Amino acid sequence: MRLIKNILILFWRVWFYCWVLFTIIPIFPILIIVIAKEEWYHLFFKIARAWAKTILFTSGFKTVVATEEIINDKKSYLFCPNHTSMIDIMLMLAITKNPFVFIGKKELKNIPVFGFIYKRTCILVDRTDKKSGRKAFEDANRRLKNGTSICIFPEGKVPSDESIILDEFKSGAFRLAIEHKIPIVPITFFDCKKRFSYTFFSGSPGKLRVKTHKFIQTENLVMNDRIDIKKQTFDLIYNSLKLDLKYKD
């Protein structure tokens, strides 16, 4: 029985990766054009959203979003979701209409095809290099001033230990939010680890539940408040995940 299940998961995973690859290849010439200039990023974002929705749909995923506060499409935000899977990126694109730029780790630029687009559309950071961190912060400042939102996975990486509910948060996201006086949007992804973890023979199609929490305002905060709002954001997401696990038990 386990063998049959693994074979089905294998076919499903291969199906997923094929859709990821073969949906990028036909539109690659268009992507090269729209990523050539930063001013055209909003057009790229629309294409990326359509691509993400296609991948999730053809892989058998259905997004279910609960929202505590409505996002204003005229404002910039700092989106902070938890990070457990490669489909987190697709899910974030699928649920968010406001154009945003990911801040992500530099190593991903080495992935064939994806890496070419990634390094031209995202803000890259090498966490072992302080200069890289400052450059990423400057790039984020510029994007925010141009009206684009920012998305940061505050854990910084997907925990290798899948028993970890939520890993420790880095402080960079919260410094950025206070610097620009923009709302922080804590977002909980409940099912990505279960549906598509980095353990290859695991996962299944199904619902991807998302909760967009009430925004954390930063207009009246100073830089010393970053620790408090980091904890507040962490607690919101952690408690939601913990409560969901308790409910399932």
Image: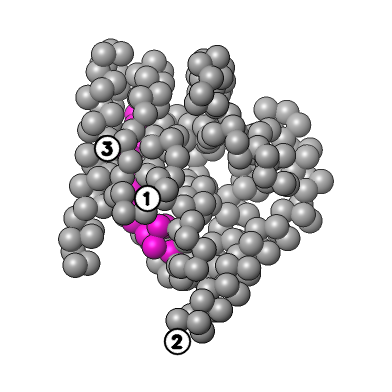
To which quarter of the image does residue 178 belong?
A: top left
Q: Is residue 63 left or right of residue 6?
A: left
Residue receiving disc 1: 161
Label 1 – label 2 distance at C-alpha: 26 Å
Which residue occupies the foreground of this view, 240 or 144? 240
Mark nearer the N terminus (3 vs 1) = 1
Q: Amino acid at mark 1?
A: Asp
Residue name at image x 73 percent, y 28 percent? 37
Q: Is residue 225 left or right of residue 16?
A: left
Quadrant of the image for the N terminus?
bottom left
Image location of residue 184, percent across then percent down: 34, 31
Which residue occupies the foreground of this view, 129 or 59? 129
Residue name at image x 21 percent, y 53 percent? 242
Q: Amino acid at mark 3?
A: Phe
Q: Is residue 77 above or below residue 93?
A: above
Residue receiving disc 2: 1
Q: Count neighbours of disc 2 (C-alpha within 10 A) and say few if under 14, some if 14 to 19, many if 20 or more.
A: few
Q: Count neighbours of disc 3 (C-alpha within 10 A) and say few if under 14, some if 14 to 19, many if 20 or more.
A: many
Question: Which residue extends farthest bottom?
Answer: 1
Mark nearer the N terminus (3 vs 2) = 2
Are the residues flagged by discs 3 and 1 in contact, CB closer than 8 Å?
no
Q: Count neighbours of disc 1 (C-alpha within 10 A) and say few if under 14, some if 14 to 19, many if 20 or more.
A: few
Image location of residue 162, percent across then percent down: 37, 54
Q: Is residue 216 visible?
A: yes
Residue name at image x 74 percent, y 43 percent? 31
Camera-side mark, 3 or 1: 1
Label 3 – label 1 distance at C-alpha: 18 Å
Q: Range of the magenta residues? A: 183-195
Residue receiving disc 3: 234
Label 3 – label 2 distance at C-alpha: 40 Å
Mark nearer the N terminus (1 vs 2) = 2
To which quarter of the image does residue 192 belong?
A: bottom left
